[in-house]
Image (tube, rainbow, N blue to C red):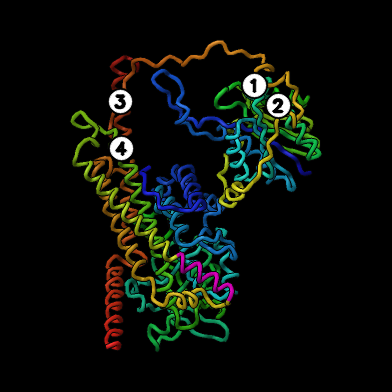
Amino acid sequence: MPLNVIACIKQTPATGAIQLDQKGEIVTSAMTYGISPLDEYALEEALRIKERVPGSWTAALTMGPAKAQEILRESIARGCDAVYHLSDDAFEGSDTYATSYILSQGIRKIIAEKGKVDLVICAKQASDGETGQVGPAIAAWLDWPNVSFVKKIEETTDKIIRVVRMMEDGQDVVEMALPALISVVKEIAEPRLPSLKGKMAAKKAVIPTWKAADISADAAKIGPGGSPTVILKKELPPKRSGGMKIDGATAQEKARKLVEKMKELKLL
Amino acid sequence: MLQTLDLEFTEEQKEIVNLSRQLAEKKIKPIRMKCDEEEHFPWEIVEELRKADLFGVYLPAEYGGLGGGNTELCLVTEEVAKVCGGIALCVAGTGLGTIPILLMGSEEQKKRWLPDLAGGKKLGAFAITEAEAGSDATALKTTAKKDGDHYILNGSKSFISNGEVAEIYIVFANANPAKGPRGITAFVVDKGTPGFTFGKKEQKMGIRANPTYELFFDNCRVPAANVLGGEGYGLFVAQATFDFSRPGVGAQAIGIAEGALDEAIHYIRVRKQFGQPIISFQAIQHMIADCATRIEAARSLLYNVNKGMDVVLKEAVSRSLASGKTVYQELRGLKPERLTKYSAMVKLFCSDVAMQVTTDCVQMCGGIGYMRDFPVEKYMRDAKVTQIYEGTSQMQRNEIAMMIIKEYATAAKAQAVAV
């Protein structure tokens, strides 16, 4: 039975590309952006369902500024059938509560257009906020069942999905009725690269952008006004002090020096 | 990565570069040392390249390609070779086995073989070299005896890249030994044809990720419909192919040089001797400057020649689609003089640059540069073959000089007639 699947993705600064100025503020001009690394796994699994279950349909959904269209184009290049962009100045400053509400309203509109959505896939968390709240909260707004930390989809039918959830002490196998939401971990599938033909198609694609009114979003539930979270203070983690660098021409030489040093410090 | 001059590539060509680079960095870099060490051919990378649509970038859209030309093929080869010159050969070697079909194939032949090659579903190979016929290809001993609507091939081929992994082989055999070189004929032979088997796998200095095999033909029956360009036209097929394929070796060579210099610079920026990073020594700086300058010059030559070639190639392809004549016939109509000189210059210059640069990179890195733990020595081993295959550097010089002598002789004759 074909499934309609949505991957929720977010544009974040590319990790490793973040530079801080002398005051410790992020240098935004030096930043490059991409799909939040863990979201790539959500997108990949959504695309694999399309390949496993003939006739299925896969879309990517994001909320963000105009620039966020870049990751939607990347999603088309990787093989998504459709992409949706939720963008409105009124969305700015939304916390996880408001963001999940906005995304759930977007999903409701997609359901209205497509007839049904069977599965929404999120990553366990984004690379910037790292809250891990948005996925389960979307399910709560939609009143759908959800499972987090999914490392494998064992089976899907038109009625149910059975998944393997990673736990600290082992793993659970959980079955839920569809429609449902899962949040996935890295183990689920290695993300693909786009294809050249996909990239060409992505360049030409016209991406639908929905504002607050398009998704019938309640003004009281979006933006700073709809966000109960208050950030009191931001600070950088303390810089690591001391330490020493072990140099050497080869890995073997460095290892030997490290062992010597550890012996000297009576750590070995 | 070393910055090189923006050569004004199109948006599509830039996408090809980005995608090839991404694929090489993410998928090839982690396995290249293992492939080299174990002489392992990475089918998983073939699959990645296939899914990314990178095999057919230079072929017309009518046959499943992306409609590019030599530039596109060279961009893919260069980017992959920056990470691994050996793995790049699965693309470049397939190009060498595909170009003869594109240039010399009839419409039926092109439709039969090109889509699978463009889609990366099948790899190609080119088999001209024999034990006694290297630089002197006319000395080849493999025979093709006509038997009804088939030819019966007997003989062997040596040092065939993409050997055993390719499905489609361009094989040169003499159909009329009495005519000498004018009996040489090009055949397309499918892997699995009865009587076509593989001999020993060669153990090589470099490009070890690509299998090099001996091929055997023992009463191998090949349909006459698989002859490219007609009986006795084999040397034309080979020459025309080399005119377009040699820049591919140049691209592989430049990629190897760029990759080696990049690895070397990363190391010499942090390697300290006499209390400072060795990149601060002028002796090292001058070597870097020479390496980068040579790379820049080689790249400019490569892509300039490609640009000129692609103009005539694309025009010939579109005329051939309309007229039903072969691309080669249309090419000769458009540009009677061959592109041999420029194509040979590209291969000669780029491969010499690759050898100079990779040797200097090993030198700049010192002891570690010589060790297998560090990739620079692999680049040097991979570079060497680019001065040898598809015509040694010495043969390229012969061809370049021969073309210049011909140019002057023709001009002198014309002048004599005018007087």
Q: What residue type is labelled 1?
A: Ser
- The count of marks equals 4
**Residue at the image position 27 percent from the left and 34 percent from the top:** B271
Residue A102 numbered tag: 2
Q: Rounded to the nearest whole Å, what is the CA distance between mark 3 and mark 2?
A: 50 Å
Residue that lies at the very extreme toward the front in this rendered image: B419
Rendered image: mark on residue A94: 1
What are the residue bounds of the magenta stretch? Answer: B310-322
Crowd band around label 4 with a 10 angstrom C-alpha radius: few (<14), some (14–19), many (20+): many
Nearer to us in this view, B33 or A69: A69
The residue under label 4 is which amino acid type?
Answer: Tyr
Chain of the residue under label 4: B
Identify the residue at the far top of this view. Answer: A232
The secondary element bearing badge 4 is classed as: helix
Same chain for mark 3 and mark 4? The answer is no
Q: Which mark is residue B267?
A: 4
Q: Which of A206 and B189 is in front in this view?
A: A206
Point out the tag, 3 or 2, that comes first from the N-terminus: 2
